[in-house]
Amino acid sequence: MHQHTMKQILLRQNLYMSRCTPKKIYFEFGVANNNNLVKYIKTVQEFCKENSGHSLSDFHVYGFDSFSGLPKSNHAADKHVSFVKGEYLCKREILEANIKKTGFPLENVHLIEGYFEDTLTQELLQKLLKEEMFPSIVIMDCDYYTSTQVATDWLYPLMQSGSIFWFDDIWSFNGHPEMGQIKYINEFNKSDKGWFFDFDIWGDGIQLKMFCKQEWEWNELEWKK
């Protein structure tokens, strides 16, 4: 995601629409080359400098990755010439070193290592619900249809209307509706969970989506807070 896009999202969620949108919590599934995660941290630092009353200590970053590259998948919707086991490997120590260089509070960076099927547990979900870690920006850079499905279905209880998703690999299959991340989005939008709507800022196209639940949860009482 472009850094200016991240800045526009932060402005929307934390200033312009701050009463009816999630704020300050970043999730990234598939850290890959770690550019987006570090880019987000730098954008948050700039945002806090420019907007008084916002502290770095209020922002949290969650990164989910195997740190061993793509897993093997035999699912038909995942089959792509570029998607092979071990591809897009990101070394955890490189990511941690890059984060440390930014000066961002390390206690607010949470890296969960392992394949999604193993790490996205009900125990972790309940912990995040208790801590009210509702994602405001979610980067889905996990390539596969199956990985996107596992990650988003697990995340759903934490999702609130107004959260912004970036589906990094949505164009991997040239728009084929039954392949990759587009397949998952199409299925999700036909369910009773809610919708992912195109949210185009600065020409970022359909990779950028706004999530909205079918039942509007930001009611009048919330608005008055």
Image (cartoon, rainbow, N blue to C red):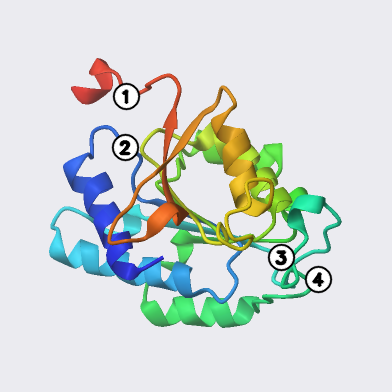
- Asked if residue 191 can be seen in this view, the reply is yes
Question: Marks 4 and 3: CB-CB under 8 Å?
Answer: no
Mark number, residue 66: 3
Q: Residue at x 41, y 65 (%)?
A: 1
Question: Marks 3 and 1: CB-CB under 8 Å?
Answer: no
**Which residue carries the number 4 mark?**
85
Element under label 3? Answer: loop
Question: Marks 2 and 1: CB-CB under 8 Å?
Answer: yes
Residue 51 rendering spot, x and y as whole percentages = 14, 58
Q: Earlier in the sequence, mark 4 or mark 3?
A: 3
Q: Residues within 10 Å of mark 4 (few under 14, many from 20)?
A: few
Numbered circles on residues, count: 4
* Residue 85, placed above or below residue 57: below
Tell me how far mark 4 sits from mark 3, CA to CA: 12 Å
Tell me how far mark 2 sits from mark 3, CA to CA: 30 Å
Q: Residues within 10 Å of mark 3 (few under 14, many from 20)?
A: many
Q: Quadrant of residue 110?
A: bottom right
Observer-nearest residue: 13 or 130?
13
Observer-nearest residue: 7 or 194?
194
Residue 60 rendering spot, x and y as whole percentages = 42, 55
**Which residue carries the number 2 mark?**
21
Q: Amino acid at mark 3?
A: Ser
Q: Amino acid at mark 4?
A: Lys
**Which residue carries the number 1 mark?**
218
Element under label 4? Answer: loop
